[in-house]
Image: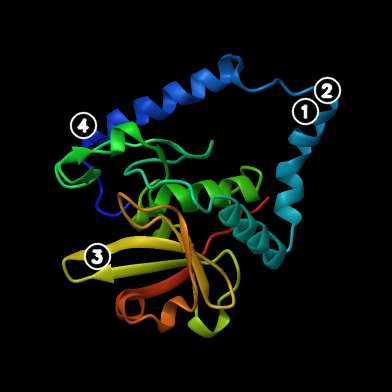
């Protein structure tokens, strides 16, 4: 999510995502059996002990699995794609509020979901680009690895965008209303993105 939405719009989006979570909990997905539940319970500990490189590759794999999902302003949480919403400037396309009728991700919703899913819930990033930047450790450009988050900034929109580095200089991201989650090859060689690059960060699970 680029600019932080107003409290009213943020609350609206949270309510929508909460409703989706309640629907899922009400039986739209099958309940876990005893064996699956036991595996699920042990997953967070396994994620904490997973080498950083392996965790990053899992993040990149989750991101790749979301290619083609629509962009939705305010969309996406730890459950996956969700309904977005519109504020005064965002979520609109040709005068129509696409956010509140589209199930998808915005940029920070995608990175939030990928890291949460890949880490089995041990890494939970805020649904706001600046929060994600502040919750992650800086990474030099020459040390980029799959799973690292790439941040972009402009004078008129500080830290307005985040994407997921997936290796070989490529990024997967949710760019703007009317687009789909997409891959950008050699992203830091593309003038538009190279000119706005504000640094890379690496999230990680909290200490055990």
Residue 34 disc label: 2
Disc 1 is placed on an element classified as helix
Q: CA distance from mark 3 to mark 4?
A: 22 Å
Across and down, in percent, residue 48 comes to 70, 52
**Badge 3 vs badge 1, beta-carbon distance below 8 Å:** no
Side (left or right) of 102 relative to 48: left
Does dot 3 land on a helix, a strand or a loop? strand
Q: Earlier in the sequence, mark 2 or mark 4?
A: 4
User: Along the horizontal axis of the image, is 164 left or right of 100?
Assistant: right
Q: Disc 1 designates what residue?
A: 37
The residue that label 4 is drawn on is: 8
The percent position of residue 144, horizontal first and vertical second, equals: 55, 76
What's the distance in space between the residues labelled 1 and 4, CA to CA? 37 Å
Residue at 60% across, 51% down? 65
Is residue 137 something that shows in the picture?
Answer: no
Vertical placement of residue 81 versus 125, above or below: above
Q: Residues within 10 Å of mark 3 (few under 14, many from 20)?
A: some
Quick one: which residue is furthest to the top in this view? 26
50 or 23: which is nearer to us?
Answer: 23
Q: Tags 1 and 2 in contact by the CB under 8 Å rule?
A: yes
Mark 3 / mark 1, whichever is N-terminal: 1
- Residues at marks 2 and 4 touching, judged by CB atoms closer than 8 Å: no
Q: Position of residue 54 (x, y in %)?
A: 72, 63
Q: CA distance from mark 2 to mark 4?
A: 41 Å
Using the rendered image of the protein, determine whether residue 43 is visible from the camera's viewpoint.
yes
Image: 22 above or below 165 = above
Q: Along the polypeptide, which appears first: circle 1 or circle 4? A: 4
Residue receiving disc 3 = 158
């Amino acid at each position: 999510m680029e600019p932080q939405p107003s409290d009213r719009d943020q609350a609206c989006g949270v309510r929508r995502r909460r409703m989706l979570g309640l629907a899922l909990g009400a039986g739209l997905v099958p309940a876990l059996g005893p064996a699956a539940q036991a595996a699920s319970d042990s997953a967070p500990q396994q994620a904490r002990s997973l080498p950083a490189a392996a965790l990053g590759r899992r993040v990149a794999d989750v991101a790749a699995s979301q290619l083609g999902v629509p962009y939705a302003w305010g969309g996406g949480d730890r459950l996956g794609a969700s309904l977005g919403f519109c504020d005064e400037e965002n979520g609109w396309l040709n005068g129509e509020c696409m956010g509140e009728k589209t199930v998808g991700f915005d940029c920070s919703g995608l990175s939030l979901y990928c890291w949460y899913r890949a880490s089995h819930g041990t890494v939970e990033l805020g649904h706001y680009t600046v929060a994600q930047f502040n919750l992650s450790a800086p990474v030099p450009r020459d040390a980029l690895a799959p799973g690292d988050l790439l941040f972009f900034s402009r004078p008129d929109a500080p830290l307005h965008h985040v994407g997921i580095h997936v290796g070989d200089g490529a990024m997967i991201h949710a760019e703007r209303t009317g687009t789909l989650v997409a891959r950008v090859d050699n992203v830091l060689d593309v003038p538009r993105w190279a000119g706005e690059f504000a640094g890379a960060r690496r999230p990680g699970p909290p200490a055990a």
